[in-house]
Amino acid sequence: MAKETQTPARNSGPAAGLDARVAFEVIAFVLGFAAYLYVVGWVANWLHLAAAHLPVDVVSSYSTARIVGDGLRTTALTGVAFTLLCLLAYAVSKPNWGKTGTDWRQIADNRGVLAAVTTRKVELPPIKPLRIGRRQKTESSPNDVQRQAHEAEQRGQDTESSGRADGRNELAAEAPAVDESSGSPGTTVEASSGTAHPSSTQTSEAWLRVIAGFSILTVAGVLAIVGAVVLGEWASRLLPILLAVVLFFGVAVALWRLGPLRWPRTHAVLWFFVWAAVLLASAPLGMLLLVAALISTFGGALARQERPGSIAAWIESPIPWALFATVALLGFAYQAIPPVSFPGAVLATTAGQERLGGYLDRSGGGVFLAECRQRVDATSKDERVLFLPASAVRDITVGGRAQVFDTGRRPSLLSLGTELLGLGETPTLIKPDLRPPSATCLGGVPDQTESAIGALGNVVADPRPRRPPHAEPGEPPIEQRGPKEKALVELARRYQPTLEVSAADRNWPVSLDAVLRELGPTRTPVCLEPAHKCPLSPEDLSSKAGSSSPTEYLQYPVRLKRDTSPTSQLDAFERGLGVTSPPTLERWLAEPAILEPWKTAQVYFYYAGVRATNKWPPATRDSRLPERLETLEYWFFYQYNYFPFAVRPNLMQDAPIAADRRDVDFHQGDWEHVDVLLDPTTHMPLWLYMARHSDEGLFIPWGSPPMVLDGTHTIIRAAFGGHPSYPPNCGPQPRAKIVGLSSDWLVCGPQFAFRAQTTPLVDLGRTTWGCWPGLFGEAFNGEERKSSGEPESVLDLKGFKLVPGPAAPLRQAENSDVCKGGANDASYAEEHRR
């Protein structure tokens, strides 16, 4: 008997249609997500180029794979960040949820704070999420059932179909249990049917906690940012950070403990403040705040959505697309935050040239490279995109130091809107640095005018050394002392240091005569006060006994109480030398040799003979020092002094002027020095003493690290602004006197090198002013005059910013007894020298 074979019937009817629908929706979702990634990648690249002030039409040349990849990378990174933010928001709201959860539930249920306040007299019970798969029958009050029915009606739910879905109408009269003593949430039910939905309730409760946490974090963050920005206008960097931390945690704790309905008017004021910050903050920050504000304000709509139970339901639900939109907005805000960086690239052409810049893309038959020029404030200009066809490219290396672009412009969302409408730009009131500023255009292609004359690496030296050297203007060099003192001249010249000074400092060691020729913008000269004698020459500052007074001081044409800018001081100096149009600071840094500082550079020398080592400040002495040493003093006279008290460390090496935020210790006429200490018998060098800040100097054994020698000449680097002497190094040098809270800075950008072999050396003991009793700078009418022998005090807040000029070099530091008894006797100095 033959077997009957039965062919299974094909799926047909509603089930087959449902499977086809799900497959279609999945395919549509995948295609939609791919389109989403493309749009995100395209917009992110567009914003990145726009923030860098580069042509945005370059994006149209990018490959599709590049754009989709950037979209996927942006989505993944910001998705992770958003997930962490949600977890943080959930954690912030959870500890006090038993007391404040009801308030947030009322706000979500009533769709707003005001509506929640008006219905608060009917206390709604908190809701306790159920475990998945578990049902609990509870008793409910009529008010609860009425409230739930009202909610179901607002959601547009069909109570009859809800009851028929799975035979759950039997629970229509049941409602959540209320435990008012503990404040623990109960079970949510479908008001029309009384059916418990554990999964949906749990999702809703979690979303409410996330929304509550976002609200707390947003308000606390806005207040912290505003406080930090306001304080940052006049305080150092540390204080705004501390204030921001205190404000953030203080406001967050207050909101966490009190809940949103305790003071509804205050709540309204805070949210008005948040939305004002969204519009008036710099656009990237405004976008971030906008995302947080949208979640906090309209997130309740997502909290009221039931959790989908199938793939098709997820695709149809607004929840995933709302999340994708949120992630996209966060990604766009991140890409638009300046400064903007691109990977560094070195491109070798077939013509044998090299181009340095930011790598954009390799498509369209060539390579796109971004270039710019740096401004002195660490912003960029002349941004452009260079396209080199593949036939012109021999090799390209991507990596190394990133190329940074930053126009310095920080428009707000409101300003972008008004500009788009043609209404002009509005002010940006909140513009903190969300990313630390960086030196821009590193490795960019310089103009031909930027090639510094005689540059040796980062050191710019005199391209035309003069022999014998003579400053213009300046005193006769030490070589003119005569043949009888040839041995002393050779000794002084043998150990004269080579000095390096940052070109960004706008100061270098000069002659006194050059400083006395300074002229203000209205041709005001340097005057001797209080006699008001001007103009002056070095001979007017007499060391002769009885011809001068300790109350005298030099009044420079640029007064400190009116203008403390180093550039203003430099302009007055150059104006006095006949430079009618001093170069701008930007050109000065691009072309450091333009003013030829070697023409006016000069070092002073004083032979102190064999001196007891107890003459140096006690704080600086080294226990290894012998009792007596032969002393050669080398003095540097700088036009101006300022101490960078608050700086941006990451900018100090590449853009020190932009990094220098707050200065103190302003004074004119800055005397600094180093001593070469010899064996009294053999005249061989044993020690090097580098003076710093009155009593922070350091003794270094000759030839030992960190000392650096160029033959017999030690190399000295002056710290930025304040000019204390250090071995050649880079970076911060913490000051021990203030427990490392602030530092001297050795800036290793372009340096002026004043070589020992070519820089004039003048005998200080032969000058007419070596023991002049006055001050070499503004003294504020004598009101704040400080004794030349008194160490500076960081606790002297009154004199911490504006400081009187220094005393004569033979009246300070280890020379306190050179001008005997305070007498103005140059002959005594000469006798002591011998």
Image (tube, grey):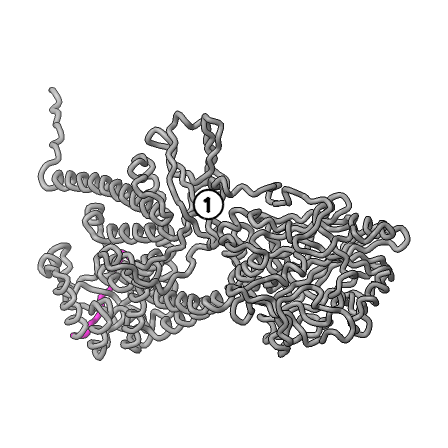
Q: Which residue is mark 1?
A: 441
Specify the principal SS of the magenta part: loop
303 horizontally vs 231: left or right: left
28 horizontally vs 793: left or right: left
Q: How many marks?
A: 1
* Residue 125 is at least partly visible in this image: yes
Taking depth in this image into account, of 538 and 788 the one nearest to the observer is 538
725 horizontally vs 285: left or right: right
User: Does the magenta portion include 138?
Assistant: yes
**x, y percentage for residue 28?**
20, 41
Amino acid of disc 1: Cys
**Residue at position x 69%, y 60% in the image:** 672
Residue that protrudes farthest toward the top in the picture:
1
Q: State the SS at label 1.
A: loop
Taking depth in this image into account, of 803 and 612 the one nearest to the observer is 803
Res. 387 image quadrant: top left
**x, y percentage for residue 271?**
29, 69
**Residue at position x 30%, y 66% in the image:** 276
6 horizontally vs 435: left or right: left
The magenta segment:
130-142
